[in-house]
C-alpha cells in the first residue's frame, strides 16, 4: 500500500517496479486498491454484529489520519471512524487503541466530543513530527472530556519501556475505568525499529506483545493495519501478529516464494533490527502515565468505579513539563527527537 501511495504522489518512475510487485502480491490493480480498505474494514465489523467471529483483521485498513472533509497523511477515507460508527449501533462503549508511531488524529477528532468512544494513542510527539498533534493535554471536549488519551513518546523507545512503562499501565487503567464491550486496535508498523519514517526501536515481538495483550481481554477485537514504510518488516510484523491472533506457530524462516527478493538476504521471520538511543527516561514515562491515570479518575462511566474531581494541576503534569523543557534546552536544534 505504501509503495502505491508513494508512486501516486512522488517518484513514480523510480518506484514503478516495486509498485508492480506490491500489486502482484495483492493481486489487485491500482484502481482496486483505492476502494479496498474501508469496505473490508466495514465487512470485518459485520462479523461482530452477526456474532460469527470474535476477532476480525484488515491489514489494509487503519487509515487513521483522514478527516471528514479532507485526506491526510496517505489516508483518504478513515475506515476506522466508519467502523466505530457502525459498532456504536450495537455497543455502548468502544475502545480505540493506536500503536502507530504517528498520532491517530483523525479518529480522535471524530470522537472528540463523544463519551461512548475512548481513543488511546501512543505515538512519537513533537513539533517537527507529523501530524504535530497528540499532546498530553488533548483530552476531549464537552461530553468527550477525558475520553481522549494521548501518550506522547520520544524517539528510540524500546520493547520493555514501551510495554511495561507505557502501554500496559495505561491500557490496564483504561479497561478498568471505561469497561468497553468491543476494541478496535490500529497496528501501524511504522513504530518498528528501522522504519523509514518512524524513530522508535520496537522489535516485531515487542509490537506483537501489545496485540497479544489486547487479545487476552477476550472482547470482540477489530485489528487494523496502518503506517509502515520498511515494507519487508511490515510484512513480517503483520504475518507474525496474524499468527498470534489465530493461535498458530510459524516457522522461524520465511518460505521460499516468488517474493523472496523483497526480503533480501535475511529470510528470518523475526530479524535483528537496528535501534536508536532511547530518549524516554524512566522519570518522563512515569510522569506521563501518572498524568493519564489522574485524568481517568475524572470519569464515572463504569458505575462500580468511584471518581473524584482532579485538581487543575495534575500530579505528573508539572514533572512532564519540567523534564521536557530541560530535555529541549540540552538538545541541539538540529537533533530529531
Image (cartoon, helix red, strand yellow):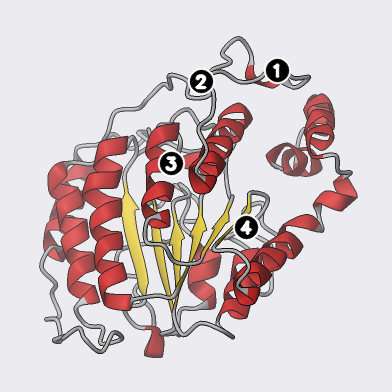
Of the image marks 1 and 4, the number of the one nearer the N terminus: 4
Is any atom of residue 139 visible in this view? yes
Residue linked to disc 4? 63
Residue linked to disc 1? 260
Element carrying mark 3: helix
Element carrying mark 1: helix
**Residue 252's mark?**
2
Q: Position of residue 120 (x, y in %)?
A: 39, 64
Query: Measured along the vertical axis of the image, is residue 299 above or below residue 171?
Result: below
Quadrant into which the C terminus falls: top left
Instruction: Tell us which disc is closer to us: 1 or 2.
Output: 2
The reply, left or right, for residue 141 in relation to residue 11 is left
Residue linked to disc 3? 208
- For residue 279, what is the image quadrant? top left
Of the image marks 1 and 3, the number of the one nearer the N terminus: 3
Residue sitting at x 69%, y 21%: 262
Instruction: Tell us which disc is closer to us: 4 or 2.
Output: 2
Nearest the camera: 126 or 89?
A: 89
Q: Quick one: label 4, few (<14), some, or many (20+) residues within 10 Å?
A: many
Amino acid at each position: 500500500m505504501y509503495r502505491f501511495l508513494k508512486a501516486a504522489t512522488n517518484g513514480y518512475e523510480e518506484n514503478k517496479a516495486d509498485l508492480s510487485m506490491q500489486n502482484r502480491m495483492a493481486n489487485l490493480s491500482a484502481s482496486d486498491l483505492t476502494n479496498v480498505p474501508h469496505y473490508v474494514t466495514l465487512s470485518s465489523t459485520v462479523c461482530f454484529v452477526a456474532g460469527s467471529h470474535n476477532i476480525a483483521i484488515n491489514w489494509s485498513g487503519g487509515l487513521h489520519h483522514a478527516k471528514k472533509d479532507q485526506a491526510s497523511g496517505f489516508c483518504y477515507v478513515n475506515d476506522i471512524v466508519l467502523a466505530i460508527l457502525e459498532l456504536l449501533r450495537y455497543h455502548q462503549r468502544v475502545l480505540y487503541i493506536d500503536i502507530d508511531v504517528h498520532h491517530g488524529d483523525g479518529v480522535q477528532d471524530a470522537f472528540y466530543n463523544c463519551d461512548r468512544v475512548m481513543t488511546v494513542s501512543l505515538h512519537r510527539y513533537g513539533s517537527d513530527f507529523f501530524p504535530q498533534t497528540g499532546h498530553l493535554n488533548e483530552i476531549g471536549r464537552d461530553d468527550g472530556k477525558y475520553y481522549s488519551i494521548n501518550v506522547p513518546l520520544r524517539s528510540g523507545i524500546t520493547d520493555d519501556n514501551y510495554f511495561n512503562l507505557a502501554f500496559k499501565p495505561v491500557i490496564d487503567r483504561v479497561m478498568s475505568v471505561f469497561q468497553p464491550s468491543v476494541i478496535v486496535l490500529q497496528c501501524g508498523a511504522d513504530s518498528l525499529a528501522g522504519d523509514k519514517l518512524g524513530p522508535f526501536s520496537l522489535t516485531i515481538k515487542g509490537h506483537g506483545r501489545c496485540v497479544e495483550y489486547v487479545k487476552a481481554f477476550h472482547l470482540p477485537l477489530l485489528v487494523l493495519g496502518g503506517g509502515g514504510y520498511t515494507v519487508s518488516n511490515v510484512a513480517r510484523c503483520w504475518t507474525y501478529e496474524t499468527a498470534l491472533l489465530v493461535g498458530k506457530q510459524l516457522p522461524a524462516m520465511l518460505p521460499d516464494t516468488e517474493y523472496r527478493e523483497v526480503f533480501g538476504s535475511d529470510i528470518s521471520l523475526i530479524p535483528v533490527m537496528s535501534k536508536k538511543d532511547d530518549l524516554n527516561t524512566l522519570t518522563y514515562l512515569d510522569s506521563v502515565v501518572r498524568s493519564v491515570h489522574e485524568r481517568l479518575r475524572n470519569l464515572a462511566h463504569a458505575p462500580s468505579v468511584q471518581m473524584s474531581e482532579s485538581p487543575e494541576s495534575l500530579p505528573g503534569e508539572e514533572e512532564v513539563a519540567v523534564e521536557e523543557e530541560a530535555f529541549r534546552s540540552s538538545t541541539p536544534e538540529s537533533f530529531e527527537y
